[in-house]
Image (cartoon, grey):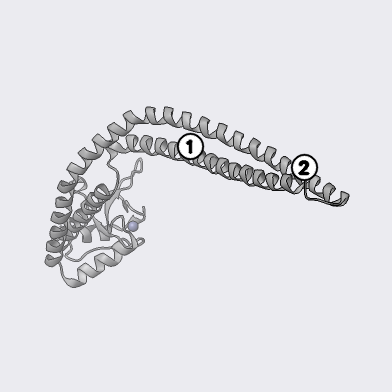
Amino acid sequence: MSQNLQNVLELQNALTSLREAEQRLHGIPDWMRELHEEHTARRTEIEKLEETAAEAARQRRTAEAAVQDSQEKLKKYQQQINKVSTQREYGALLQEIDTVKGTISASEGTAFTALDQQEKADKELEALREGFRETEERYAAEMTRWEAEKPGIARQVEELKARIAEIKKRLSRQVVSQFERILDRYPGGATAPVRPIERPGQKQKEWHCSACNYRVRPQVVVEIRNGDSLVQCDSCKRILFFPAEEETA
Ligand SMILES: [Zn+2]
């Protein structure tokens, strides 16, 4: 294998490790994913119920204010009743009193229903919070453990970045830019191992690019093994290499 190819493979490995380390650092580690999902689901449930309780409390306050308002109006109308002088005014006032009494009764009904909803939600909330306590304690403990692991991973990230810079220095600027162009297109990796095509009863071994399955010509196989320049797949343009386990084949 050429020195260039060896360096390129090392670069790809370091970049892959860096990506994994950064994902670990900024994501939720696998060992606490299940608990994290449970925690999130329960918290969402509680938040929803809190919103229901708050909405019921708002409705209740609005209805109670409407009751109070209407009672003020009713008092005013009742005071006016002694002062009216005509039958028509009297009739109109009675109508107003009827309407406002209706409003009071409807608002009282709304307030009562809202109070009922609020109490129910509060009771449910209490039970949910009680059940959540254990999950929350476990979650806090795992978060502490996770926070303790982070500095180590952050150090790993820094080390990998330094290694990547060092490998790039070993490569020509042209090779680095060629590599980065391919990597832009395939963030998952700019290199691809060559693998044999399994075909029963075949006499001569055939090879393909394991990333895109495109056939690799025998002449190209020789070039990858013995040549000095980097060889790209005819189809996907990834840099091809022979994995160690195929070298003896
Ligand atoms: Zn390919």
Residue depth check, mark 2 versus mark 1: number of the one nearer the observer = 2
Closer-to-camera residue (74/225)? 74
**Image spot of residue 97 (x, y percent):** 75, 44
Q: CA distance from mark 2 to mark 1?
A: 38 Å
- Alpha-carbon neighbours of circle 1 within 10 Å: few (<14), some, or many (≥20)? some
User: Would you say 7 lies left or right of 119 here?
Assistant: left
Q: Amino acid at mark 2?
A: Asp
Q: Which residue is mark 1?
A: 49
- Residue 205 appears in the rendering: no
Q: Residue at x 55, y 43 (%)?
A: 61
User: Would you say 104 lies left or right of 192 here?
Assistant: right
- The quarter of the rendered structure image containing the N terminus is bottom left
Element under label 1? helix
Name which of mark 2 and mark 1 comes first in the sequence.
Answer: 1
**Image spot of residue 102 (x, y percent):** 73, 40
Mark count: 2
Q: Which quadrant of the frame does ligand 1 lie within?
A: bottom left
Closer-to-camera residue (187/111)? 111
Q: Residue at x 27, y 41 (%)?
A: 29
